[in-house]
Image: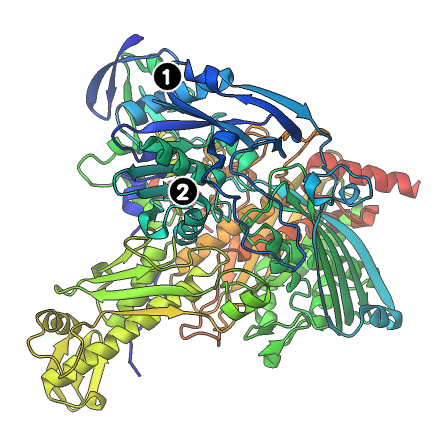
Amino acid sequence: MTHITVKVDGTTYEDKVEPRLLLVHYLRDRLGLTGTPVGCDTSNCGACTVDLDGTSVKSCSVLAVQADGGEVTTVQGLAPDGELTRLQRAFHEGHALQCGYCTPGMIMAARDLLRENPHPTAEEVRLGLEGNLCRCTGYQNIVRAVLAASEQEVTA
Amino acid sequence: MTETVAREVGRARPRKEDAHLLTGQTSWTDNITASGLLHIALLRSPMAHARLTRVDVSPALERPGVVAAFSGADLADGLSSMPCVWPVTEDIVMPDHPPLAVDEVRHAGDPVAVVVARDRYAAADALEAIEVDYDPLPPVLDLESALADGSPLVHSDKGTNRCYTWPLKTGEDFDAVRARAEVSVRRRYHQQRLIPNAMEPRAVVVTPVAASGEYTLYSSTQIPHILRVLLAMVTGIPEHKLRVIAPDVGGGFGSKLQVYAEEALALAVARRLGRPVKWTESRSEGFLTTHHGRGMIQDIEIAAKSDGTLLGLKVDLLADMGAYLMLITPGIPLLGAFMYPGIYKMDAYDFTCTGVFTNRTPTDAYRGAGRPEATFAIERTMDELAAELGMDPVELRRRNWIRHEEFPYTAIAGLTYDSGNYEAATARALELFDYDKLRAEQADRNARGDTVRLGIGVSTYTEMCGLAPSRILRDLRYAAGGWEAATVRVLPTGKVEVVTGTSPHGQGHVTCWSQIAADVLGVPFEDVEVVHGDTKAAPQGMDTYGSRSLVVGGLAVHHAANKVVDKARKVAAHLLEASEQDLEFTGGVFSVKGSPEARRTLQEIAFETFSSHDLPDGMEPTINAEHVLDPDTFSYPHGTHLCAVEVDTETGQSRIRSYVSVDDVGKVINPMIVEGQVHGGLAQGIAQALFEEAVYDDEGNLLSGTMADYLVPSAADLPEFVTDRTETPATSNALGVKGVGEAGTIASTPAVVNAIVDALRPLGVQDVPMPCTPERVWRALRSAQEARS
């Protein structure tokens, strides 16, 4: 067992974990932060995307011990006061989610994308979200929502 | 007649469902936990077909954290065969399907043993300790050779791999019609197997109360009500002691329209141990065990006059059942059987389907279920006929489709389409697509010998959905009915609860049912709560599949709400000392005609009914109402899709340049939700055309068994769609609505493949098998080239 200290959504946790424990299972099973779901086992789907020290990561591909000393933000930490972020609002207003299973990862990835490229083109959004799969929306409204959140006019 | 003001219906309301999904406050089944929860892991067969000569679970019990382990024999008592509720013919072969294999495994992934442990890692670790001896048997993989004499058998006790043969012959005799035809086109198409891949993997949690014998089962399911009935039968747990909850469910597309072995096993283990248990599939496990879709070989022949007038259609289908019959496996091709003639008029129709067992994962419903396959076959063949006749494919369709003034129209397969306007949808699609301009560009590029060819694909469709009139289901030998239930309750404070038997998993029922109820009752949208997905809270239902929710379940809400108004009217008349006929009901307010100051709101009536101090003599003290609706007919949405594809003849790469869909789903409750359904449907249909396929090797191993090997398209793989609607109200229901959930998937696959073939036809290509990968396009070009030289 390895001792880790990790700050998640503003709260600092100290835990002993097996070295093989995935970050996503640490979040879900140990901390009860089930807002971050698991969608695959090959790091293709991106449903489990969280922010680790300022970069989006697929938390199924990171060990909990790798987050030691780090700071994690999950979808549950985005709107601590209940007020949705611009991106969350854009997803809501633009019907960019149906079943909602990919949504936490999609929002965390889109957040990272907009941080790096505040005014992306639709094509850049599509490429930027390539690592996040959605089976419901056909992506059209997701792309539009990300563009809307970047305060750009949404065409088409 | 209740007068309603349409304030909500038709509005693009953002969804009520979103708030908790956007913030991670979700209750996916895998999120659910309980004190002392144990985790289940399943050992699965690595072989497609083998006799089990030994399963020894005892070494697993030595592993840390393991609480119990069971073989199939250990759990055989108290678990019956998994159910199939659609025996499509009297002489159908219905093999035994134990939830845990006992003496034979019949597909890679068939479960052979269960481990129960304190956490999911410990359970997974212990699987490797289980000792199993497999005695390999030859796998049955090819549909045609499976039917040949001497083929190895999937179920040796049945003596055949033929599950059933189901014929449908309507109109004139096809052979007679073909004899007088001036042209006929015969083609074979393969509907590759697809793997549904809802984003949420399947999961099940069971919490037992040993003392009372009560069980609560949470499952990632589309069908909590059907599941409860059938799990009671499979496990022997009395139905009234079993509560089934579908919490947040992350997509389904038919894959969660199922009663799965893991659900029965979780109940059996919880019963045996008296402890709560959870099983969550890994994605790769799901590839092997969550049912697959499609998997058919279609032989289709169309006979016509030289002016393009269709005379008859003959379809011979081989349908891959996989290793077992799951819930409605045999019936899936029947849902397509009535749709091969599509929107066209003809004199003869001859359909036969043969279901075949193979040593592969069982097939069952996947978005569209039978109808995408049918639409693909007819629409591809119409393009082939157009090419044969040298006719524009849109013109060929125009000459044959049912004209709008001919509705209601009884089509050749026997269904009466209530409404439609194929002319209007096609005209709008052609306009948005700029069809003539693209044709001109295509001709120009062909003339230039451009290495990147432009192809234009058209697909027109209708489909039968809104499953289903119960008597028709009886005639098709389906075991259950097709009704749906709704209850509308006005609470003492005037807030409204709508209880629905549909079980949403992304479709937006909560929002749409709120819109419907708000309009009928004249209450604010925000004041309506929708209760669903829990057999204790919403006890009666037939659940969600087959684009049925709105046209059956939503209609039931509409009717139940109207009953509430009718009851409230009696109370209002009593309180206002007026006759019911003299009351108006507008915007949630009863008023006396001619004296508008005499008024009572619905909310006031609700409270008066709650107190019951002054109700009409003999009136039951409630204005709540329920309605169980059995539809009179199916729902027939339709539309026209156009796709432009650029195909690089040097690399075989296809790129969708533009995609236009014009769908007619009748009246629309929420246009934003309808558009979203179309988008998602298009993505899945396009994915069949271009990307997805369950690939097996010669020994029956699934090669495309992970998301790394099976291409679920990403945002970067799909184009921006242009979607629009025409609106021809259904005449078969009070809201004028039609189903929408499957339409996009049904129409889009042939539009894309037609476009690819259209691009390559001048180069001698007549077909590209799906998925039309660059390699397949390139090979098709090469063989066309070789054939010509």
Using the rendered image of the protein, determine whether residue B290 is visible from the camera's viewpoint. Answer: yes
Among the 4 quarters of the image, the one containing residue B618: bottom left
Which quadrant would the N terminus of chain A be assigned to in this image?
top left
To which chain does the residue with label 1 belong?
A
**Where is B244 relative to B777, above or below?**
below
Q: Residue at x 21, y 67 (%)?
A: B523
**Where is B315 relative to B148, above or below?**
below
- How far across and down, in percent of the image, does residue B621 sit? 15, 73
**Which residue is at the far top?**
A2
> Which label is found at residue A21?
1
To which chain does the residue with label 2 belong?
B
In this rendering, position of residue B198 left or right of residue B167: left
Whether callout 1 and callout 2 share a subunit is answered: no
- Say what amino acid the circle numbered 2 marks: Ser
**Where is B764 relative to A40, above or below?**
below
> How many residues crowd mark 2 within 10 Å: few (<14), some (14–19), many (20+)?
many
In this rendering, position of residue B397 left or right of residue B266: right
Among the 4 quarters of the image, the one containing residue A147: top left
Q: How is the image coloured?
A: rainbow
**Which residue is at the far left?**
B613
Observer-nearest residue: B262 or A69?
Answer: B262
**Where is B44 relative to B679, above or below?**
above
- How far across and down, in percent of the image, does residue B659 sit? 58, 52
Q: Residue at x 41, y 60 (%)?
A: B671
- Say what amino acid the circle numbered 1 marks: Leu
Q: Which residue is mark 2?
A: B220
Helix, strand or loop at label 1? It is loop
